[in-house]
Amino acid sequence: MSDLEGLEHEDLPRPGQRVGGRYVIARVLGSGATGVVYEAAHELTGKRVAIKWLRPDLASSESLTARFLREARAAAEIDHPNVVAVFDAGRERGTLFLVMELLSGEPLTAFLARGPHRVESVIATLMPALRGVAAAHERGIIHRDLKPDNVFLAAPRRGWPGGAKVLDFGISKLKQPVDGRELTHAGVFLGSPLYMAPEQILEPGKVDARGDVYSIGVMLYEGIAGRVPFEAETLPDLFRLVMHETPAPLRGVRPDVPAQLDALVRAALSRDRAMRPDSVATLARALEPFAGGVRFDPSEHDELDVAPLDGGRTEIVSAIEAPAPRPASDLDYSSEITTQPAISLAEIQTAIHAGSTLSSRTSAPPGPKPWLDRVPEPLRTLPMIVALALVVFLMGLLIGLVI
């Protein structure tokens, strides 16, 4: 079976071909709705890289090309060891490509799928990613799509001890947008609903650093509790929970969670962003007492963490965007504008306040069974037997009266 099955009709690079005049394609690492990720090598130096290729049929989309360029510019501006590096970018065959560092390890999604985890393991594993996000904020860049698939737990390599790296700044909010415009024009919402702050649902253009704090709070909660703070059958139901409800306290799920940590995670998940930690750096430093010795501001002599820290086996996948299946019990709505029809803010507001549904645009497992289906079989059968006996008795009595 070809790695590019289903995409043969498109003008995509093949193994052995050159891209950008100097990168030789080695193999396909993965493909998705927007494009293909390759492993390649620099023709002269032999350096192995990952190349992210935008599908040619999508290259005419202004929003997608803006996202591609935004990702390259954001990574270049941040230039931090805990943010995936973008080395080069170019145009070829009528589309765009990015040249990125090639990582080995696994996405945070795989780590969370093995949870729930010890508190120290969750926080120590996420701490490097918090350094990367904080570095982005220092440069006026808000990620806006932090989620487990966009945090990669990189394996150690020579000269670097490994740790979490933040990926995909494609919908980030830059201080100076690449094309002079924000991606949220025309009222289309971007992001991943399970990890989106309430304010991002209705006012995506006004999201600040505290929106990323909320997303990190969701990942902390998920790692410790083994589930996300809010789950629902449909997208509007999820949004109503996010905007009007309070997550169950972590201590109610895990009594071993320190009260101070529970309060900190609840603060990060506050619907009122004024009640959240004012920055990722503030949140990270407050998490240090629960991180098993891992610090947000490590000295050059500190032993840095190597993920994953849960004792689980790390599968080396050599990919930047390697997918990992989420347990069937977890809901994972995708709101990427390329994987489902764009949903307007007006539709969302109507659904939240009027109770209408957008479920046809979501992918969710079947909802809870009716209450009777949850009653044990013997208890469900007994009332039926009693009712049948009563009917027989009444019919006998009626026949006796007639005779």
Image: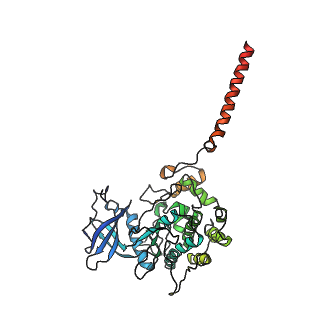
24 to the left or right of 241? left
Q: Residue furthest top?
A: 403
Residue 183 position, x and y percent, is 45, 66
Report the front residue among 317 and 367: 317
Find residue 381 and report its image quarter: top right
Q: Which residue is drawn at 59% across and 61% down?
A: 229
Residue 2 position, x and y percent, is 30, 58
In this rendering, the answer to whether 324 lies above or below 301 is above
Q: Residue furthest right?
A: 401
Please say whether residue 350 is visible from this viewpoint.
no
Residue 137 position, x and y percent, is 51, 77
In this rendering, the answer to whether 61 lies above or below 20 is above
Report the front residue among 381 and 178: 381
278 to the left or right of 183? right
Residue 181 position, x and y percent, is 44, 69
The number of callouts visible is 0
Q: Residue at x 31, y 62 (%)?
A: 56
